[in-house]
Each structure stands twice: as C-alpha cells, then as structure tokens.
Image (tube, coloured by chain):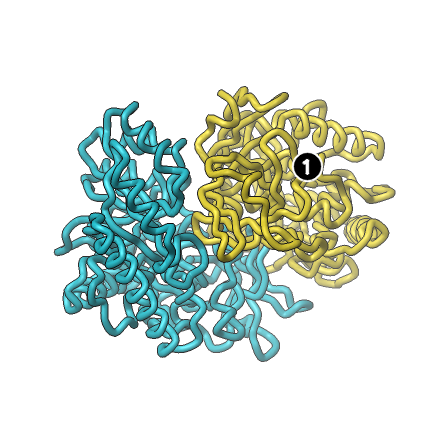
Chain colours: A yellow, B cyan
Amino acid sequence: MQITDVPTPALILDRRVLTRNCVAMAERMRHHNVRLRPHLKTAKSAEIAALATAGQFGGITVSTLAEAHYFVGNGYRDITYAVGIVPAKLDEVAEIQQSGAKITLLTDNLDVVSAASERAEMNNTNFHLLIEIDTGGGRAGLPAESSALIDLGRAIDAAPGLSLEGVLTHAGHSYHCKSETEVRIVAEAERAGITLAARRLRYAGLPCQEISAGSTPTAILGNRFDGVTEMRPGAYVFLDLDQVGIGVCGLEDIAVTVLATVIGHNRQTKRVLIDAGALALSKDLSAGEFLSNVGYGLVCPIDTTRPYAGIYVAETYQEHGLIAASDGEPPYDSFPLGTKLRILPNHACITAAAYSTYHVIDEGVEVTETWGRVNGW
Amino acid sequence: MQITDVPTPALILDRRVLTRNCVAMAERMRHHNVRLRPHLKTAKSAEIAALATAGQFGGITVSTLAEAHYFVGNGYRDITYAVGIVPAKLDEVAEIQQSGAKITLLTDNLDVVSAASERAEMNNTNFHLLIEIDTGGGRAGLPAESSALIDLGRAIDAAPGLSLEGVLTHAGHSYHCKSETEVRIVAEAERAGITLAARRLRYAGLPCQEISAGSTPTAILGNRFDGVTEMRPGAYVFLDLDQVGIGVCGLEDIAVTVLATVIGHNRQTKRVLIDAGALALSKDLSAGEFLSNVGYGLVCPIDTTRPYAGIYVAETYQEHGLIAASDGEPPYDSFPLGTKLRILPNHACITAAAYSTYHVIDEGVEVTETWGRVNGW
C-alpha cells in the first residue's frame, strides 16, 4: 500500500528515522556506561519496544498498568511503572507479577508503606519500590536533601513484603529550557540530585541498587551520568517539534507524522482545511514556547519531513485543521482538494495516543507494515 | 460495582443528567417545530444515540466514517457526515450505503462534483450532497450571498449520480460568545444565513429540501428557528465547563466527568497529584476563555458535580494532573492519598475521545452499566 492510499487521518512512522533514533540513544548510553530503560509511554508498541531495547538489558518503563500488562504479554520481565503508586492499584500489580515479571513501583509518600505491605501479604507477593526524588521538576518526589527521604527509606526497608530498590527522578523541567546550555545545567542537577539521594540512603545503611534518572533532553544533551545506573528517556524514539524547539534534534529526526488530506479552501479566512483536527493532532501547543508560527504542527509534503516554509496548522476543531501561511495567503494551488500532507506534531507522546495503529514506511512512500499500540488505562 | 472500585482514570457518565439533557433538547426542538439530528461526534455511543434520538425521526450526524460504520451497524439509516467530503473517501461511503443506509455528504467546492459523480457511477450508487454555508464561523462553507453557491448547486444538480439535498451550516463561533445575548445574535445570524442560502437555491430552480443548522449554544439559546428544517447540536448531551462559561448551562448539567485518584502531595510546589493527566483530561483549555482558575478542569467530590471552591487542575503531564488551590495551599488533609475525585472537563467531546468505555451511574455512586465508544477513524 502506498501512503497515498491510507485513509486519513493516520499516523505515519518512518522506520529508518525511528531506528536511527534508537541506535543513537543506545550508543550514547553505552558510551556513558549507563543502562537504557526506555520509557514506552511514547511508543506503546511491542515492535518499537524491540527496537528500543535491542542490545540492552531488557528493562523498560511504562506509564500505565495497561502498558505493563501489554508488555509482559510481549515477553518483558523487568518493568518500572513510573507514576506514584496508590494501594488500590496493588492488586493489579500483584496479578501482573504472577507471570514472573517484576514491576518496580514508585512512591514519595510514607502513607503508602503500611498499606502496600498489607497488600503484598494479602497477595502473597513482594512489591519493589523506588523512592521518587524531585531534582527540580516540581512535579512529584522528595527533595534529595530532605529528612523525609531517610524516614521513607527506613519504613520501606523495614516493611514485610516490600523491598527498597533505589531512587528515581525525572527532570521534567528540561522541557522548558531555552538553550542547550540550560538543558545541560538541568541534566547535571538531575544527576547530582539523584546521586545525592542515593548516597544519603546508603550512608543510612539502606539498600539503593537502582539510581534512575532521565528525560529525553537530559539524556541527549547531558555531559555526564556518573553515579546514575540507568536513564529512562521516552520521546527520543519519535522526537517532535517540541524537542526541535528545545534544541535536542532537527526536523529530519522526527519519526512520526500525521497524514492528512486537504478537504477545503476558505479564501475568505485564508485557510486550507485538512481532515486532521484536535483529535488527530491533539490540542498540545508545547512547541509554541520556543518556535513561532508552529501552531498545532508544521505542514510537509507527503514524501519528506521538511516543512513548507511558513505553512502551519493555525486552528483546530474536533475533526478539522485549518492551515495558515505566516505571510498572508496560503498557496491554494499547491494544495488542491484531496492533496495528502504530513504534519509534524508538537508533542509526539500526546498526538500518538489518538491512534490505535502506526503505518510504517521504510523508504519512499510505501507502507510496509502496520503496528499496534496499547492505549487507555 | 461502586464508583470507588473503578480503576482510574475513567469516564463516569451520569445517566440521569444525560437523559435530562436529551429530553430538554428534544422538547426544545419540538417546541420550535424543528427536527433534531443529534451530532454524535461527542457521544460516539449507540446507547447514547438511542437516548438522543428517542421520539425523533431517527436521523443522526457523525464526524468520521468510523462513526458512520458503527451507527449503521447499530441500525441507523439516515446519517449526515458533517465534514467536507473528498473523492478519496467516496468508495468507503458507497460501501456503507450498500447496507441501505443513506449517508448525506457535505461540500463547498466545485472541484468535488465531477470526481464524485464518477465515483457514484463506478460504485453504482448515488451520493447525497448538502452545500456547506458559512454563517460567520469562518471554518468552512460558502457565504450565503456568494455567486459560487448557485454555480455549485447547479453543478451538483446536473451531475449524474449526485443529488442536491440542501444546505448546512454550523455556527462554531457561538463557542466564543461572551454573553447569552451574543449567542442569540449568532443564532439569528445562523438562521438568517442558512435560510437565505436555501431561498437563493430555490429561486434558481434548484432543490433544497434540507436546511440544516446548529451548535449546542445556538440550539439552546436561539429564540427562533423559522425556515430551518433540522438542528444538529452534539455537546448538549454531556455539556461541560466551556458550555458553562458560554452561559448555556449550569455545573449541575454536566453529565460526564473524569474519575481520578489522588496519587501524591507536593508541599514544596503546593500541589495535590492525581492520576489523570494530559491524556485523561485532554490538553483542551477552552473554558479558560470565560472562567478563571479552571485550568484543565474543576475538582469535585466523588458523589457530586459541585466542585470544591477554588480547587482546579492547574497543570498536566501525560499521566499526572496537578491540582492547585486558587488561594494558596490545597487542603492536603481533605485529599489523602487514594482519594477518588471527579473532574469536570473543559470540553467533553475532546476529553471523552481518550476513553473506550463509559462507566454509567444512575443514583448515588453505583456503576450500573458500561457503554462502549467508537473512537479513531
């Protein structure tokens, strides 16, 4: 099937770019002697997981228990569920672990410990816990220097049915850095913070085998990872306009695009209409923090990810996208009704979540495979 | 199953509110002597379609061909696909029509006509077309007074295999009105524009049986619909914070909420964390155009849609939502870890699209049914 025969909107995945991104990250982590535990919340696909873990130790990261079920079903046995755990989800975790997989969990909260310990006993299992550390992202986690860290470590270590595996952080604020230098500063803060937390636990006589960090910007641009045992980037497999804006990659590194069809011209409002709207592109506007005239995505011809200059999706409705030109009128004649276009997404993780399928291309515009995704919860 | 037992995040649908919204719209349209062709892009569910079409003529509106397939499979035979058609989608339309259903299509573009006529002949079918009219929304459609309208009408009417059914408009700009009065002005412009377009076609000797208009704000607040044959609101079945902001309804009229669990407290950044983030709530911020301190949604206790004063989802990551208080620190003690909350969405159409299932409640907090949805394309 040619790309032009795929019903639109659809998600197109360029395997060559995907593979290049996976190999580059693997080599980078190997060079720095850090294990790569790819975060599969972006890809949610067994085929992509196979590429991302090729030559690695096999550990992965997930953001939902639906992903955990799916990847265990696809043979993965060492999975970190990187969202703070609550006791109500532990019966499901226990069920997933029955297959022999190890699901490592996350907490920063002392209130979890006794309830988790009870659930471990009830389910006749053991829960593996990492303590979440905030190294500046401000989302979740204890500060590396907090006294609560040691209290929590001691409580987990002492609780029957729980094992303290180590510490974990995510430098989410790297997504708002305005320069490569700033990302490098955040990367060093992430490294310094997580290794400090680990040292403090060890000095307190507590186990801390895993020292887990990572975001795509800090994994790609960080200078050193000394003391970190593993990195967990996710968006690097696809990359997107947001990552281009941060300075992490170029447009040619974006592996995933939305295929759309021109469905109209509105000469009154100077817009070209496509059939990819708020659901197909998502309402994510993150690249607008860095780039001007990017809107809901940049518009490319069918056979490349080099966008037309100044042509972007300016507005979205549920199933309509409205393409504008930054300098006035779009060249309607270049986009006759029925034209297929590819849209570079702002944030690949969010855009991809609307699709159940990837249409994979290798060279040119032939779709060689379709791969599934595990969406929802 | 109690609501508290539903794995989170999940979509909760209050059947009493849904039914009330459906009955109110049906009565309103009956009072105005206008047929109701509900737009099912919001609900995407056969069970909800049954409520929305109860006592009506049975026609519905869809936004994707996936919805058309699904609703034909559920017995609907009169379906308007309200997104501008392109010839490449006509073979699929023909296939759906083979079951005996009539799929009415939309265009504002002369270039469609000859290609559609050819496809009709190739598929041995007839395509039913409405001409899209722009009554001020600025998305798609010809101005009611344009000369292109008559040219397009004549071309459709003359083309073998095509039938001109009438005209259609959507006053999408009603979503940006700042007062009820402003919505009523837009509603009258919608009515006046679409009936003018119809009169012009009829004066030119062209058929124009269907005069279709509608958006939820104009359908709820419009004073008169004289000359309009049918209205196509969709969001009214659920309503949402955006509609509250426009002034169309109250908080007690919102039928759909996102169930979430408190997964953490961040006292450094004054946030309560929940497991409903950018995918579970969407990145839609539309109600912020009208309401302050609404963010990605307002936060309610488990058993009501009356939000806590000043408590809202201020930030989202893929699977994390961060709840803030408008006056400083959230009351952590009111939201212990594991607390279940319900979030009122900004834009129900976009939020619901992340879910494959509705958890239906009737009274109190017991889930009495689960209903499916047709997502994707």
Q: Residue at x 55, y 32 (%)?
A: A12
Residue picked out by circle 1: A306
- Between A225 and B147, which is closer to the camera in this rendering? B147
Q: Chain of mark 1?
A: A
Circle 1 residues within 10 Å: few <14, some 14–19, many ≥20: some
Outermost residue, left side: B55
Where in the figure is residue B345, as x and y percent of width and height? 43, 62
Could you tell me the amino acid type at mark 1? Arg
Q: Position of residue A362 (x, y in %)?
A: 62, 22
Residue at image location 55% in from the left, 51% down from the top? B319
Quadrant position of residue B73: top left
**In the picture, which quadrant includes the C terminus of chain B?**
top left
Question: In the visual, does B33 lie left or right of A292?
Answer: left
Closer-to-camera residue (B18/B145): B145
Total numbered badges shown on the rendered structure = 1
Query: Eyeballing the image, is B158 above or below A286?
Result: above
Secondary element type, mark 1: loop
Residue occupying the point 54% across, 31% down: A71
Kindly tell me whether residue B96 is visible in this rendering: yes
Q: Quadrant of residue A29?
A: top right
Q: Residue A211 placed where, x, y %? A: 75, 43
Kindly identify the residue that appears in the image at 36 percent across and 46 percent down.
B63
